[in-house]
Amino acid sequence: MTVAKIYKMKEQKYVEPKIEYGDPEIVEPIRADNIFGMFQAISVIPTVTPKSFADQIQIYTSGATYRVYVYDVINNTWRYATLT
């Protein structure tokens, strides 16, 4: 360590963290039995680019076919997993 770095470390002062008072915001937890109500159920394969994170997950149903589509933001394409 150089003398300049040691001197600079001595100059730094402790800053007291700011504490905010008031009622904390209570966020309801997401229950597993409610998760399917969060995603849009569709009957056509998704082709549009989603605008929000919630739009990146789609549940596809067509007859006896059930799939979960997830938008791949790296490759800009939809990927799916078949549900049984």
Image: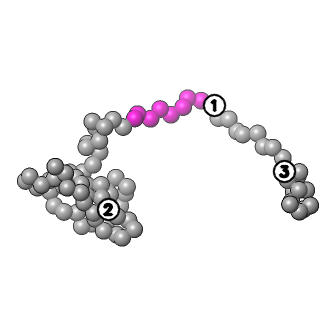
Q: Mark 2 belongs to which amino acid?
A: Tyr
Location of the N terminus (image quadrant): bottom right
Residue 49 x %, y % = 31, 66
Residue at point 29%, 41% (across, down)? 35
Height in image: 12 above or below 48? Answer: above
Most foreground residue, 53 or 61: 61
**19 left or right, relative to 23:** right
| Category of crowding for the residue at label 2, using alpha-carbon neighbours closer than 10 angstroms: few (below 14), some (14–19), many (at least 20) | many
Q: Mark 1 belongs to which amino acid?
A: Tyr
Q: Are marks 1 and 2 in contact (CB under 8 Å)?
A: no
Label 1 and label 2: CA atoms lie apart by: 41 Å
Residue 5 falls within the magenta-colored stretch: no
Image quadrant in which you'd find residue 30: top left
- Mark 1 or 3, which is nearer the eye? 3
Height in image: 60 above or below 38? Answer: below
Residue 61 x %, y % = 14, 53
Q: Which residue is mark 2?
A: 71
Disc assigned to residue 12: 3
**1 left or right, relative to 21:** right
Residue at point 59%, 29% (across, down)? 22
Disc assigned to residue 21: 1
- Mark 1 or 2, which is nearer the eye? 2
Looking at the rendering, the stretch of residues picked out in magenta corresponds to: 22-29
Image quadrant in which you'd find residue 15: top right
Name of the residue lying farthest toward the left = 63
Label 3 and label 2: CA atoms lie apart by: 47 Å
Q: Is residue 42 visible?
A: no
Q: Secondary structure at mark 3?
A: loop
